[in-house]
Amino acid sequence: MTRFSVLFYAFFTIITACSDYEDLVKTHIETKINKTADPCTDFYAHVCPTDLPYNQTVADRLRQLYQQEAAKFHTKHDEFLGHLRAYTLSFQKIVDDLLGVCDIPGDHKSQAIGFVNRTTGIEFSESLPCEFISYTFGMKASGKNPKMLFGEPLEMYFYGPRELEFSKSELGQRLSRNVENFFETFQGEVQKKFLETPWLINKNATEIYLEFLKSNFSLFQKTEKIIREWDMIFETLKNYSTNCKPNNTIPSFVCAMEELNKLIKEEARPSMEFYMFGQGLDALNLDDQILINRANQFLTLTNNKARMLGGFGFIVAHEIMHTFYSSENNDNILKKYWTNSSQCVRKQYAATCREFGQEQCFFSGTMMTNEEDGSDLAAIRVIYSDFEKNYLHNEKSDIAGVTPQQMFFYSLASLWCTDSQYSLGTLGSHSDPYIRVNALLAQMDEFKESFQCAEDSRMVRSKVEHCEIFGSDAPQTRKSSHNALLTDST
C-alpha cells in the first residue's frame, strides 16, 4: 500500500466515525433553503434567505458549537479571566483602573496612554493630566462593544486558556487528526493538478511547484510544547497585571491588555500563534503555513463527503491556493515562474458584479479583491475534482431530492450566508459573499449540469470565459501581469 493510499484510508476512517454533533450544514440545507428562489437564477438567494438571522447562519452556529464545547473545560486561569470579564461589564471600572495605572510613577503613564491611543485612536501626550485622559477614554469608549474596542488581545484572553484545555481533550485531538489527514491527502490532489497544468509544463516549472508544495508547505498545529508555553504566558500575564498597581488584589485590566498587546507588537512568539485562538470561520495562510481554526474543524465531523469537501475542503484549498495564485507577489522561487491569471478572474467577478449587484457593486472584479477571487477559483476546481474522482462514485445522498453533486455546491454556499445579503462592499480583501458564491458557481459547468440549468438561465449566462488556473484545461501560457492590466480595465 502506497503512502498516499495509507493516508487516504486513515482520512476516510477517521472522518466517517459516528458523530454526536449536529451536522449544521445538513440542517441548513434541510430547513433554511429558499425554495421560492430558482438555483439557476440566483444560487446565493436560493441558499441564503434574506430573512436569515446571523445567529442561525452556518458560520455563527459553528462558532456557537465550538464555544459550547470549549466552555465545558475549566482552567487554572478562570479566576483571572473572570476579573477581566467583569471589567468589560462596567466601563466605569475600566476608567477607574486606567486612572489608577496612569497615576503610578514611572512607565505606567505611558502604558495608560498607549491603551487609550490604541482603543480610541486619540493621541494623548504625557503632559496631559491623568484625570483628563481617563475621562476622555470613558466618553469615547462608553457603550461600545468591548470586542470591537479591545480587539485581538481581549479575544485571546477570553478564549485562549479554554482552547488550550480543549486541545488536550479527546474531541480536540480528534479534530486535529482529521485536519492533518485531510491536509496531507489533499496535497496529493494539488500535485496531480500541477502535473496536468500546461503553462507549468511549458515553463519547465512543474517540478519546482511540486517541490515547493512538498517542502515549504505545512499545517500549523498546536503541539504539546506550544500549549505548555502559552499556559505559562497566561500565568505570567496574570501575575504581571495583578502586581502592576501597588496594593492591588485583583488584576488590572489596562495592564493585562497592554502587556499582551506588547507581546503581539514585538512578535515575541511566532506570528501564527497570535491567530490560533480565533472563534469564527477563520483560516490563514501566513508564510506558506496554513492555520484552520477550531470552528471550521467541526465541519470534518460529518459522514457526508460532499458536504465535507464542499465546505471544509474548499476552505483548505483556498488557503493553499493563496500561495500558488498570488506567487507573483511572493518573495520566493515561484515568482520566477509565475504567469499571471488575473485577467479571466477579474472578468468573471466584474460580470457577476454587474449581473447581480448592478450599480451597488463596486469592488469585485478589481485588483482590490483579485488575490482572494483567484484563490477561490483555483480552489473550487481542485476540490471539486478531488470529490468527483475519489468520492462521488461511493457517495449516497442523505437528503431527499438533493444529489451528491448538488450537496457539494449547497455546502460551499451555505458557509457564506450572512444577515446582510445585498451589502455589496467587501469583507476585507474578499468579494461580498453574494458575489463570491455566484461568480464561483457560474464558472462551474458541473454546477450547471447538477441543477440542470438552461443555457439562458441567469447563473449560466453570467459566465464570461472559462477560467482555469491549474489543471489540464488551463491555458498553454498566461499573459504577463503588465499586459493583463493594460487589456483588462475595470
Image (tube, rainbow, N blue to C red):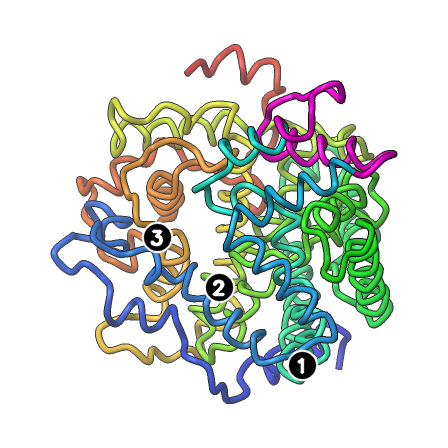
In the rendering, at what x and y percent does residue 478 appear?
60, 27
What residue is drawn where x is 62% and y is 37%? 325
Q: Are marks 2 and 1 in contact (CB under 8 Å)?
A: no
Residue of label 3: 417
Residue 69 vs 124, above or below: the answer is below
Which mark is nearer the camera, 2 or 1?
A: 2
Is the residue marked by circle 1 packed among few (<14), some (14-19), or many (20+) residues within 10 Å?
A: some
What residue is drawn where x is 77% and y is 74%? 3
Q: Are marks 3 and 1 in contact (CB under 8 Å)?
A: no
Q: Are marks 2 and 3 in contact (CB under 8 Å)?
A: no
Q: Is residue 293 magenta?
A: no
As measured in the structure, the alpha-carbon distance from the residue carrying label 3 to the one carrying label 1 is 32 Å
Amino acid carrying mark 3 in the image: Cys
Is the residue marked by circle 2 packed among few (<14), some (14-19), or many (20+) residues within 10 Å?
A: some
Residue of label 2: 63
Please identify the quadrant where the N terminus is shown. bottom right
Please identify the quadrant where the C terminus is shown. top left
Amino acid carrying mark 2 in the image: Arg
Amino acid carrying mark 1 in the image: Ala
Give, as a single range, the part of the protein colored magenta: 104-132
Residue 346 is left or right of residue 69, and the answer is: left
Residue of label 1: 10
In the rendering, at what x and y percent does residue 36 appear?
12, 56
Front in this rendered view, residue 158 or 379: 158
Q: How many marks?
A: 3
Q: Between disc 3 and disc 1, whose residue precedes?
A: 1
In the rendering, at what x and y percent does residue 361 appear?
32, 27
SS type, badge 1: helix
Q: Is residue 127 magenta?
A: yes
Residue 445 is left or right of residue 107, and the answer is: left
